[in-house]
Amino acid sequence: MQGLMQDWPLTVDKILDHAKAWHGGREIVSRSVEGPIVRTTYAEIHERAKRVSNALLGLGILPGDRVATLAWNTGRHIEAWYGIMGMGAVCHTLNPRLFAEQLVYIINHADDRIIITDLTFVPVLASIRDQIPGVKHIIVLSDEAHLDGSLPGALAYETLVENASADISWGGFDENTAAGLCYTSGTTGNPKGVLYSHRSNFLHTLVTMGSDVLGIKATDTVLPVVPMFHANAWGLTFSAPAVGAKLVMPGPKLDGASVHELLETEGVTFSAAVPTVWQMLLTHLRTSKGTLSTLKRVVIGGSAVPEAIVRGFRDEYGVDVTHAWGMTETSPLGTQATPNYAISQMDAEQQLQFKLKQGRAPLGIELKLVDDDDKPLPHDGTTFGRLKVAGPFVVGEYFRAEGGKILDQDGFFDTGDVATLDEHGVMQITDRAKDVIKSGGEWISSIEIENIAAGHPKAELAAVIGVVHPKWDERPLLLVKLKTGEAATKDEFLQFLDGKIAKWWMPDDVVFVDEIPLGATGKIDKKLIRERMKDYVLPPAAGVASGAVALAAPPEPKIYAPEPEPEPVVEPGHEDDAWLHWTPDAAQSVDRSRREAPAAPADHVEAPADAQLPFRGR
């Protein structure tokens, strides 16, 4: 016997319909790519999104066709997003922080028919236009006056919207129809496509609205610093309209000063971004003696959050920081570190230790921990194992079957993470499987060491990798990028770690570097670090002083550049040096712009995204 309730397909167009019907006057505020702050409402967004649907139909787009966006977080991007999905096409969000050749691969693999782009990325598309023949039209999210002719045949978004009708019926298709396409960042092999359905996005939205998860309310003002091209901005561009929250879209400016300006002028109460964004904001606040008068809650993901950031926001500004975890393959929410009843009864310091973990699974997510033989492991908070996940908004297979079968016999997806689970159901990522350090048959968590090291008052960023050891197989090496103007020694950092980690976890060496490269989702690019450190040899005995290493990523991969960068300083005589440049006890820079670009992407910290929700986004 079946129930007798209405068959009401869970399609995402209903989210914007709801926002228009019941929260139509609520504001969406954007820092536009052209510069000015632009204000609109859910009702206006709804009407213009319907015009987008008709404009796409006029350009030959049919249900199921892929329409890509290469754009920042703005109201126009939201219009395009809902306009694409509402008519049954697939919204494919492109990550502009990838190499040009990766963008070409992804666009062609997805068979994108149209690309909707911001002005920022017109030069990128112009440079690859002849390599993406399947793309029939490129639409620039601006007006005719801002098209400079550098991309022949480009169409002005505003002209298309103005000339299109808003008379179109959305939905009317099965809830399992594809809605969105997002590619992993390709840390191993080619990027892989994750094809979200309307149903999976709708269910993910309902879950994130819960008070134990994002807990956004109609009274909130939400600033999604995490980009829409990182797994749907962690679902915020669905959940905010679903509850009628005011949205503040940051556009291309993600530096501390620009984020702070929007937080204060727009009365933001809730925000979400990766740790590097919040580190930049914290630095700006301390330098400028700024305040946070309305911000109450922050969700951090993409990589593990250093304790110093959580303490800084809590103790200095009264802002509650919650850690979360997820990935492109989980839509992306997987866990969030909101306390259960038992944890809530603990004192503040005890609770803080749980906030630094990746958190508990909400309804709709199942977790399991297994060993290399796929046998279940105990939830004791100390046993490391491979983390697997299942649920209605978890990937079942990759787009076009890339990678073949990806689920185990029980329907669980292997995340590639190494983690622990404790008696409260709280999960903690200890490493990526490929990054875990295996020393003497035991595992050492590189993430835990680097997060503690990043809390040193002189450290800006820290990374830990395993290096070959003749006796123990691998031993940890700590790399540190110091804050501007600081100098430090190896012993300072080893003493700082002493007592905070197990003795046998202590790094065998500390190397000071001029840059720690970040990947396309704002996380430390350990693949690139390992490649550049492949010839490094541990010192023969403890106490040997380390030199400084220039580890900056070459500027070529940075294809987004909203702010001009200063010219690099080239040391005389080192114009053609290898990237390693040893100097006594102080981190210095050398120019490596003449070196061949590496095979993996590497970002700069000026404008990081995202993009592990907490979120690896891989």
Image (cartoon, grey):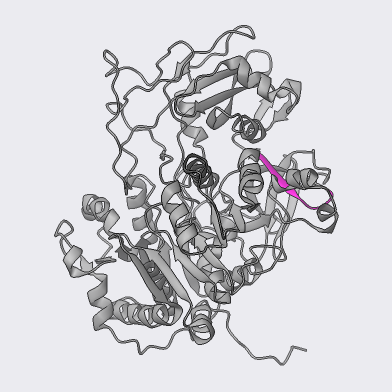
**Image point (75%, 21%), residue name:** 503
In the figure, 95 relative to 599: above or below?
below
Q: Position of residue 46 (x, y in %)?
A: 42, 81
Q: Nearer the viewer, residue 467 or 355?
A: 355
Camera sees residue 194: no
**Image point (57%, 58%), residue name:** 295
Horizontal arrangement in the rendering, residue 197 relative to residue 322 (left or right): left
In the figure, 556 relative to 546: above or below?
below
Q: Nearer the viewer, residue 338 or 231?
A: 338
**Quadrant hosting residue 99:** top left
Q: Nearer the viewer, residue 505 or 187?
A: 505
Q: Position of residue 514 (x, y in %)?
A: 43, 25
**Quadrant hosting residue 27:** bottom left
Camera sees residue 230: yes
**Image point (58%, 27%), residue name:** 465
**Image point (45%, 47%), residue name:** 256
Q: Position of residue 536 (x, y in %)?
A: 50, 16
Total numbered badges shown on the rendered structure: 0
Confirm whether the magenta stretch covers residue 116.
no
Region rendered in magenta: 423-430
Q: Position of residue 412 (x, y in %)?
A: 68, 56
Horizontal arrangement in the rendering, residue 46 relative to residue 536 (left or right): left
Q: Quadrant of the N terminus?
A: bottom right
